[in-house]
Image (cartoon, grey):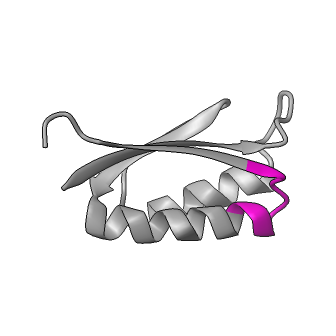
Amino acid sequence: MWLRAEFTTEPFHGEGDPPPHAAETLAVLEAAGLDCDFGPLGTSVSGPSEKLLDLLRDVLATGFAHGATRVTLQVERDADD
């Protein structure tokens, strides 16, 4: 099954480099070889459920370890699956 996930890490920061909790969660996904859409209000990623579900646990842990106070996560089954 193919899944799509979108998440935001908080606290939000203004202009400039993204905060560590945002940058490091992106690094987790990119290290796994997944294409991500990283933006100022969140990150989206899609991939096979077997891979993505385990990585999302790592994303949450990484975000909190790097200063996130909240991570909002939405996961849906890809409509084309």
Residue placed furthest toward the left: 81
State the image coordinates of residue 2 (x, y, percent, origin top left): 22, 51
At 57% across and 43% down in the image, what residue appears? 7
The residue at 63%/62% (across/down) is 60
The magenta span reads 63-70
The image quadrant where one finds the N terminus is bottom left
Instruction: Kindly tell me whether residue 49 is visible in this rendering.
Output: yes
Along the viewing direction, whichever of 11 and 20 lies nearer the viewer: 11
Does the image show residue 36?
no
Q: Nearer the viewer, residue 54 or 34?
A: 54
- The image quarter containing residue 40 is top right
55 left or right, relative to 69: left
Q: Residue at x 28, y 61 (%)?
A: 49
- The quadrant the C terminus occupies is top left
Q: Nearer the viewer, residue 75 or 34?
A: 75
Residue 51, given in percent of the width and then of the height, sits at 33, 68
Can residue 6 be found in the magenta stretch?
no
> Residue at image x 79%, y 41%?
17
- Could you tell me how many numbered marks the image carries? 0
| Residue 53, quarter of picture | bottom left
In the figure, is residue 8 to the left or right of 18?
Answer: left
* Above or below, comparing residue 41 to residue 59 in the picture: above
Is 38 displayed left or right of 72 in the figure? left
